[in-house]
């Protein structure tokens, strides 16, 4: 418990003891009133103070005002009736403070749980000076500095291993318990825990731009993006509170006046008591507290699983997703391309691969990298001139004085070079040297091990249609789609075509149904931004992913998408449960109070009891089933 919570608990105990003692003390008159007022101020002075500040600032109608008016009114009635029974007024305030303490503790606990789940913020960085390790603030470490990470410590800043090898625990970032081995030359992202060997890492980013800082900023700022449900509750409370205050005033005045007009006793004390009870019952704490807490807990539970959701509005939209659109490479497939065959080539296969690797040497595309790996030798770029990359077609270049073209069938058609179709499944790189067809190279991508299972999980989670978009040839795309069980596939798309295709699919959505696009977060930024929900996969350390997507999956496991949807639907379900439960109990109790069938104790349950139950229900969103 915090210091503030301990102080409140002490006040509750003191007030409860004083109330119990006064019940047995044989004091009467003004002394009795004075002792009860002292007890009331011990437990309720802060509520009176907040109510006064609200009135002074023009924010009259809030829960503090309702409690202050109701309890002070109960005291006034007891004095007027000379009954000496001040227990109800103090009991109402006492139980209200118990509820507030419980709510404060629950919110604090959920925040602490989320902090523990996302416990990736490093406290220091080790720098070697004069043969000794010195701990410095990560903010003070410049880019390019060599830092030392010892076993058991967190990597404080993104970088590249320059010395040592080790095993990393990335579970705080990805939710994946499987350790990851790293060696010299491997990239490291901040927030990972070094488990075995000592690592020397050359930093590649400033601390404020590193992965851990970006993730923490994302999670911390998520509460600023309100969902429609939260906006509804805020607007509801602004209208609801004045309405119940004026209703309570009407309940206190109109029935006695009508009775007096009818020649009967006005029974002012009875109706004023009902009006005060009505005010206590009407307090909207359960809704105001539990709805934001439900979303906060849902975002926290998702972050523990390596699913970073930028705001409760995205969590709510995700729960309505009925169509999921995938980019193929790096999302459903591993994006690891390998040369698997060379066909229809009159020249030596190794020589053809050499021409292809040199022509593609300026490109960072995975296909280019696979050609360079298949060549297996160092690339001498001085042998290559006049490189031209033709988007969606391929490249042309001059290698050792020979014009070389490497690309798809569209490139061969554009150059007017007859080519041979390939019956193998994969990406086909057609080659032309000196204007003559020189054969083609077959490059295959590897489907992710859980990709088919992920598609099945999405359908089980209520997704009605899965779609795959790719720039690959139709034959390759159709083969992958059939293997995975994807409902619809669109192939041979240029980068701009993907946006058009998503626009077309969005136009097909009906009602509240939403569309999610899943991509690698680097090349798919325009599409991620256009979809109702953009989900970036395999995004560890990718600035483009964190910026463009609404949801970031910290590993490249497609099964996480179905889990994210289930988390969102559970969270929204809890929100609706709390709204329905709180409003149903509130309105039922308000009616019972108005007709005289419920007293102040029922009002206490309606206020404190409903709030406690709603908060307990909200905390369920923190728990995520595997």
Image (cartoon, grey):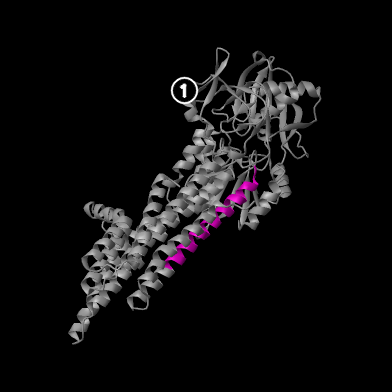
**Label 1: how many residues lie within 10 Å, few (<14), some (14-19) or many (20+)?**
few
Residue 537 spot, x, y in % from top left: 60, 41
Helix, strand or loop status at disc 1 = helix
Residue at the image position 71 percent from the left and 31 percent from the top? 429
Residue at the image position 38 percent from the left and 56 percent from the top? 12
User: Disc 1 designates what residue?
Assistant: 140
Residue 111 spot, x, y in % from top left: 48, 46
Quadrant in the picture for residue 518? top right
The rendered magenta stretch, by its main secondary structure, is classed as helix
Q: Nearer the viewer, residue 238 or 351?
A: 238
Answer whether residue 236 is visible to the viewer in this image.
no
> Is residue 250 shown above or below 162?
below
Left or right position of 571 against 244: right
Answer whether residue 617 is visible to the viewer in this image.
yes
Left or right position of 222 against 438: left
Q: Nearer the viewer, residue 134 or 488?
A: 134
Q: Which residues are magenta?
A: 557-583
So how many labels did they put on this image? 1
Residue at the image position 65 percent from the left and 43 percent from the top? 557
Q: Residue reaching furthest front?
A: 26
Magenta highlight on residue 489: no
Residue 150 spot, x, y in % from top left: 61, 25
Residue 284 spot, x, y in % from top left: 37, 62
Q: Nearer the viewer, residue 346 or 252?
A: 252
Quadrant in the picture for residue 77? bottom left
Quadrant in the picture for residue 103? bottom left
């Amino acid at each position: 418990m915090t210091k503030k919570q301990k102080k409140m608990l002490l006040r509750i105990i003191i007030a409860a003891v004083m109330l119990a003692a006064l019940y047995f003390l044989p004091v009467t008159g003004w002394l009795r009133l004075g002792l009860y007022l002292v007890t009331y101020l011990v437990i309720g002075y802060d509520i009176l103070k907040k109510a006064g500040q609200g009135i002074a600032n023009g924010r009259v109608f809030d829960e503090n005002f309702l409690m202050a008016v109701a309890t002070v009114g109960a005291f006034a009635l007891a004095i007027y009736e000379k009954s000496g029974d001040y227990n109800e007024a103090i009991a109402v305030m006492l139980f209200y403070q118990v509820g507030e303490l419980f709510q404060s503790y629950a919110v604090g606990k959920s925040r602490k749980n989320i902090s523990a789940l996302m416990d990736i913020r490093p406290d220091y960085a080790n720098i070697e000076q004069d043969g000794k390790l010195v701990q410095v603030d990560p903010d003070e470490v410049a880019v390019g500095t060599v830092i030392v990470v010892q076993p058991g410590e967190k990597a404080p800043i993104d970088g590249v291993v320059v010395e040592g090898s080790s095993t990393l625990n990335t579970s705080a970032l990805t939710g994946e318990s499987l350790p990851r081995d790293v060696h010299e030359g491997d990239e490291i992202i901040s927030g990972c825990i070094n488990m075995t060997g000592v690592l020397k890492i050359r930093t590649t980013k400033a601390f404020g731009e590193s992965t851990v800082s970006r993730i923490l900023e994302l999670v911390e700022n998520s509460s600023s993006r309100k969902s429609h449900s939260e906006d509804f509750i805020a607007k509801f409370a602004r209208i609801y509170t004045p309405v119940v205050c004026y209703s309570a005033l009407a309940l206190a005045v109109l029935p006695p006046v009508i009775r007096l007009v009818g020649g009967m006793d006005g029974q002012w004390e009875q109706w004023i008591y009902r009006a005060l009870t009505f005010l206590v019952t009407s307090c909207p704490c359960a809704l105001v507290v539990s709805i934001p807490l439900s979303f906060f807990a849902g975002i926290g539970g998702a972050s523990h699983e390596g699913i970073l959701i930028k705001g409760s509005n995205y969590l709510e939209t995700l729960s309505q997703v009925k169509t999921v659109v995938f980019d193929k490479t790096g999302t459903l497939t591993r994006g690891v391309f390998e040369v698997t065959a060379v066909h229809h080539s009159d020249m030596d296969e190794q020589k053809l691969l050499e021409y292809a690797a040199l022509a593609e040497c300026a490109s960072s595309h995975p296909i280019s990298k696979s050609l360079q790996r298949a060549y297996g030798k160092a690339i001498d770029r001085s042998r290559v001139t006049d490189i031209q990359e033709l988007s969606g077609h391929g490249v042309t270049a001059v290698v050792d004085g020979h014009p070389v073209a490497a690309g798809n069938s569209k490139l061969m058609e554009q150059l007017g070079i007859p080519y041979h179709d390939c019956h193998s499944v994969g990406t086909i790189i057609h080659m032309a040297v000196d204007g003559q067809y020189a054969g083609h190279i077959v490059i295959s991508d590897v489907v992710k091990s859980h990709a088919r299972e992920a598609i099945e999980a999405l359908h089980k989670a209520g997704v009605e249609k899965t779609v795959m978009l790719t720039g690959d040839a139709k034959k390759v795309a159709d083969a992958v789609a059939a293997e995975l069980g994807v409902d619809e596939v669109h192939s041979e798309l240029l980068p701009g075509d993907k946006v058009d295709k998503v626009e077309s699919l969005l136009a097909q959505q009906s009602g509240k149904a939403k569309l999610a696009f899943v991509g690698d977060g680097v090349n798919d930024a325009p599409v991620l931004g256009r979809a109702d929900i953009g989900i970036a996969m395999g995004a560890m350390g990718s600035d483009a992913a964190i910026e463009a997507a609404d949801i970031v999956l910290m590993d490249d496991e497609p099964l996480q998408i179905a889990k994210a949807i289930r988390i969102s639907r559970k969270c929204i379900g809890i929100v609706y449960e709390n709204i329905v439960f709180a409003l149903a109990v509130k309105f039922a109790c308000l009616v019972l109070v108005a007709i005289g069938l419920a007293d102040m104790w029922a009002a206490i349950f309606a206020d404190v009891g409903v709030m406690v139950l709603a908060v307990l229900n909200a905390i369920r969103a923190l728990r995520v089933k595997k």
